[in-house]
Amino acid sequence: MDGEDLLEFINGPSYEAEMVSIFSQIGCEDASLRDCITKALEKLTVDQGMPPSSDSWVMRNIVEPALESWDDQPVSQETFLEESKKVAKRVAQNLKEEPVIVAHSENTFDGSGIKRLLSNKFELDKLLNVGLENVPKDRNGKISKEYLRVVLDVVAPSVGLPQIGAVEQMDKVVADVLNRIDADDGKMIKEDEFTKLLTEIMGSIMLQLEGNPISVSSNSVVHEPLPSSLSLLQAST
């Protein structure tokens, strides 16, 4: 990303409408103009020519230099539109001087990882044993149902699921399944009942994902040098 796409967006017909929309979303009533513009830049996407400003390198080397010596003034929509455009042009200039490579990735959660595990009892038992290793038990060997969420998070990577908190749509699926079995009621249950419940939870998640797969895309800045073939590809885009 060398600033060309960002300049095209800035000078294009949709820029002002998009920035007005962003201004209304971020709420600048109590913020400084600098903070308001910073928040606005975070809302711009890779498709609009802006690398992820959540990346510390991008913030430090591309965004913050564009905001240096910026005089703060009362924030109005008119001022915001005028000043944010100047900053965005500086960001584009910084990208021209220090191009950024952004990798795009997509991941689909369709329950196939759970399905493979449930069809292999040996692997299932082995994974559940690993998940239960550090779970506390009472003197009778019983486990609180509250740990179902914890163990599910431990086994998640092995069945192609994200960790809890990583993907909002997946969190809703998991929460729905856990709520149906009252996972947070604190009831103490035997280990075999615990593993049975956990297996049922994974089965329910699998069925939901088979019916409604969840696709997630993300953009991340590549900090390592790319192979020459990829560098050439980057240069040609």
Image (tube, helix red, strand yellow):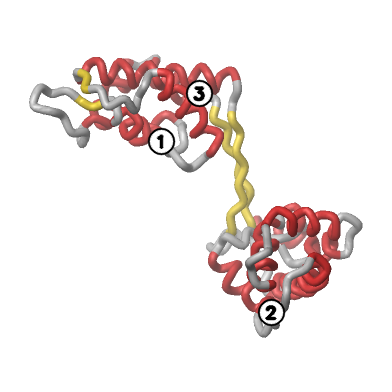
At horizontal 56% and vertical 19% (from top left) the residue drawn is: 210
Relative image position of residue 44 (x, y in whole percent): 71, 57
Disc 3 packing (10 Å; few <14; some 14–19; many ≥20):
many
For residue 209, side relative to residue 231 (left or right): left
Which residue is pictured at 48% across the width and 24% down the height? 176
| Residue 231 seen in this snapshot | no
Report how far apart the C-alphas of labels 1 and 3 lie in the structure. Answer: 12 Å
227 left or right, relative to 127? right
**SS label for mark 1:** helix
User: Which quadrant, please, contains the C terminus?
Assistant: bottom right
Kindly check if marks 2 and 1 are in contact, taking CB atoms under 8 A apart as contact. Answer: no
Rendered view: 196 above or below 15: above
Label 2, secondary structure: give it: loop
Badge 3 amino acid: Gly
Pointer 2 residue: 72
Residue at label 1? 157
Marks 2 and 3, how far apart at CA: 51 Å
Residue type for callout 1: Pro
Residue 111 circle label: 3
Residue 81: x %, y % from top left: 81, 67
